[in-house]
Amino acid sequence: MLPNEVMEQAMQEFMDWNGTGMSVMEIGHRTNAFIDIAKHAEQSLRSLVSIPDDYHVLFLAGGATLQFSVAPMNLLRGRKSAGYIVTGIWSGKAQKIAEPYTEVKTICSSQATGYRSIPARESWQLDDDMAYCFYTENETVGGVEFQSVPDIDVPLVCDMTSSILSRPIDISKYGAIIAGAQKNVAPAGMTIVIVDKSLCEQVLPGTPDLLNYQLQAEHDCMLNTPPTFNWYMAGLMFDWIKNEGGLEVMAERNLRKSEGLYQLIDSSGFYSNEVDRSCRSRMNVVFYLPNEELTSLFIRQSEEAGLFALKGHKAAGGIRASLYNAMPSSGIDSLVSFMTEFELQHG
């Protein structure tokens, strides 16, 4: 979901960007016009998140899943292993994809309990020789989210696809952040990588140039034609967040939205959420109805009421309400009202 203001600005500029007589979709990526767009987006993101100069900010083609391979290609630095915290489908997938490139060690996993919690810190199996520790901050499928940054002594690599810009970030705590754009930033097709420059100076032999963080940084992410329209849209989104009050305001709004929905679920004997309350997601509220027949009816009637994209992921079933930055509080109010009425009729 994108804010109306962002889409309206893009619509106004679609046929004529900045008096050029051309659409952003027609501007060559090596022209001064697009270079201005790209530089503005990077500086806007740097100021929004307070990214230090010793971190690269990369705008790359493709989705975040591609980075599950690219991260070990770039960040091993001659070390033989990497650690993975597995709290859901996406961190599990990242671990599996990394196996051809390094020895993968499971720091902890909640798979045995159905990915409904984050294992206690004292149970983690850490190795100081790991090149990095990978985790997914917010698991969209199961609705599990880290509420704080893991405190460990190896560089943290975080898949922040579904939570980036939803609250303040202390960049200094991370070695690298990867984030697909399609949740909180821009249309699908681009991934943002924020990476400590000191971690990407030694790639695995055979790493393609387009997947080399250092080379991409040296060429301003233009080794080949980048996803120019997505990059432009990202810049508009960064500006919108800043104009709304920044990441502190986003955090307050997102907490309020999720708390309102969880309050209804917890007070109901009809809806249920199975995630440990200490790690419930603010971005993806996953809940269940008493049976599949009611779930199908809920999805059908919610769409008739103008509430879309509520069907749970195929791996988890149930209902999933995604509360990304652009979702207004009024959208949650509408969902809560619908859920209340549905329970009265079918509970």
Image: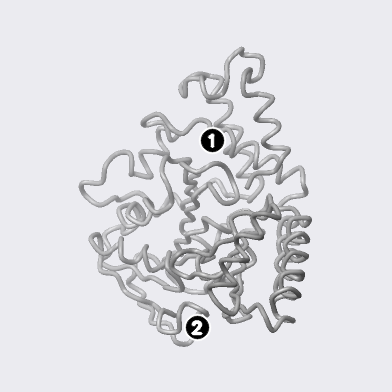
The answer to whether residue 177 is above or below residue 105 is above
Counting from the top left corner in percent of width and height, residue 187 is at: 54, 41
Instruction: Give residue 182's mark.
Output: none
- Count of marks placed on residues: 2
Mark 1 is surrounded, within 10 Å at the Cα level, by few (under 14), some (14 to 19) or many (20 or more) other residues, namely many
Counting from the top left corner in percent of width and height, residue 327 is at: 69, 53
User: What amino acid is labelled 1 in the image?
Assistant: Trp
Q: Nearer the viewer, residue 273 or 18?
A: 273
Q: Nearer the viewer, residue 121 or 289?
A: 289
- Residue at 43% x, 68% y: name it: 315
Camera sees residue 137: no
Mark 2 is surrounded, within 10 Å at the Cα level, by few (under 14), some (14 to 19) or many (20 or more) other residues, namely few
Q: Quadrant of residue 62?
A: top left
- Residue at 53% x, 47% y: name it: 181
Q: Quadrant of residue 166?
A: bottom right
Residue picked out by circle 2: 121
The answer to whether residue 14 is above or below residue 191 is above
- Residue at 36% x, 31% y: name it: 223
Counting from the top left corner in percent of width and height, residue 216 is at: 39, 38
Q: Quadrant of residue 100?
A: bottom left
Q: Nearer the viewer, residue 306 or 217?
A: 306
Residue picked out by circle 1: 231
Question: Element type at marker 1?
Answer: helix
Q: Which corner quadrant holds the C terminus?
A: bottom right
The tag earlier along the polypeptide, 2 or 1, is 2
Spatial CA distance of label 2 from label 1 is: 38 Å
